[in-house]
Image: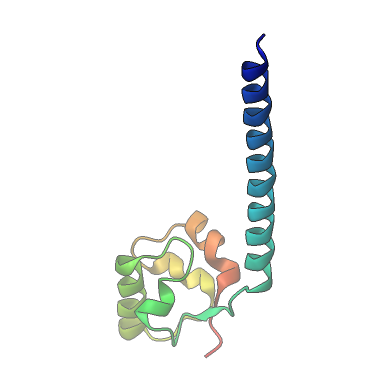
Amino acid sequence: MSEAVLITSIINNLKGFIMKKLLLVLVSVLAFSTLSFAADPVDLNTATPEQLETLAGVGPAKAKAIVDYRTEMGKFKTVDDLDNVKGFTKKGIDKLRDQATVGS
């Protein structure tokens, strides 16, 4: 193996190693920053559609369905009442359970 090829190989290996370490550091920082900035639970009875869209699996259509249900049926008594809202499944409710409340 020529000296130039050997040097190129070493440089490429070092680049890969450094990139892997930087990626690991970046992922760690993002993971810990997400944990430390956990948002307060969203109140299903008072939240705006935009606030509802911050819940896991809730987009504009589901947010509107929550507001429509709340307007027609009154306040949610529990987060499990989302089972009565079009588009929600028990599995989906379980995913957002820790992010939602019915405090008011």
Work out whether 10 lies above or below 100: above
The quadrant in which residue 26 appears is: bottom right
Q: Position of residue 43 (x, y in %)?
A: 50, 82
In this rendering, would 61 be left or right of 17? left
Q: Position of residue 70 (x, y in %)?
A: 37, 82
Quadrant placement of the N terminus: top right
Give the number of marks: 0
The residue shown at (62%, 24%) is 8
59 or 82, which is in the foreground?
59
Q: Position of residue 20 (x, y in %)?
A: 66, 40
The residue shown at (67%, 18%) is 6
In this rendering, would 80 be left or right of 61? right
85 or 59, which is in the foreground?
59
7 or 44, which is in the foreground?
7
In this rendering, would 44 be left or right of 30? left
The residue shown at (45%, 71%) is 54
- Judged from this view, the residue extending furthest toward the top is 1
Q: Position of residue 13 (x, y in %)?
A: 67, 29
Work out whether 76 lies above or below 28: below
Work out whether 100 lies above or below 18: below
Work out whether 98 lies above or below 16: below
- Judged from this view, the residue extending furthest toward the bottom is 104
The quadrant in which residue 73 appears is: bottom left
The residue shown at (51%, 54%) is 91
User: What's the coloring here?
Assistant: rainbow
